[in-house]
Image (spheres, grey):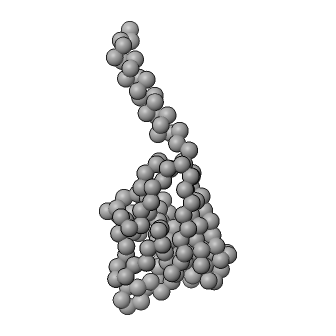
Amino acid sequence: MITERKLFLLIALLFSALTLFGQNTKLTIKITNIKEPKGKIEIGLYNNGEKFPEVGGELKKIILDADSSTVIYTIENLPEGNYAVAVYHDENSDGECNTNFLGIPKEPYGFSNNVRPLFSAPSFKKTKFTLKGSVIITIKLI
């Protein structure tokens, strides 16, 4: 026999599940200023400030062909919340962001909100944006 309390809990769980799985979000990432259409574009999507922008700390890692001056990628049905994006143009397709002896990238890179770092990678706080519904971000490579 289902009590009134159990029925209420069951209904609450069903609504929670619908909220989690029924989200209709869309994040479109537009990468511009690709000077040479060759190699790969690597996108890291982060939802954790402690792991930003660490390699391996991404929620999602996307690798696309850099076949034009602008590359666009869309991710659907992410949970609503705060995210940040780090991207680089792997011009030589070696799978890493090549840097000089000071650790400054030699290959084009960029961050959400088009934050331009000074002496180190920017913080999650400066690069984060809120995903709710459909969001389009544009990142201009540096």
Camera-side residue: 109 or 131?
131
- Report if residue 95 is visible in the image: no
In the rendering, at what x and y percent does residue 8 appear?
38, 20
Please tell me which residue lies in front, 134 or 71.
134
Q: Relative to the observer, which residue lies in front, 136 or 19?
A: 136
Q: Note whether 9 is above or below 63 in the view shown.
A: above
Q: Decide if residue 72 is in sight here.
A: yes
Q: Is residue 80 above or below residue 14?
A: below
| Residue 106 rendering spot, x and y as whole percentages | 48, 86
At x 41%, y 27%, the residue is: 12
- The residue positioned 62% from the left and 83% from the top of the image is 35
Residue at the limit of the structure toward the bottom, as seen here: 101
- In the image, taking residue 75 as reference, residue 114 lies left or right, namely left
Furthest residue toward right: 68
* Residue 80 screen position, x and y as percent: 46, 48
Q: Which residue lies at the image location 37% right of the left edge and 23% below the top edge?
A: 9
The image shows residue 142, relative to residue 86, as above or below, that is: below
Q: Position of residue 26 (x, y in %)?
A: 57, 52
- Location of residue 83 (image quadrant): bottom left
Q: Quadrant of the N terminus?
A: top left
Q: How many marks?
A: 0
- From the viewer's perspective, is 99 left or right of 62? left
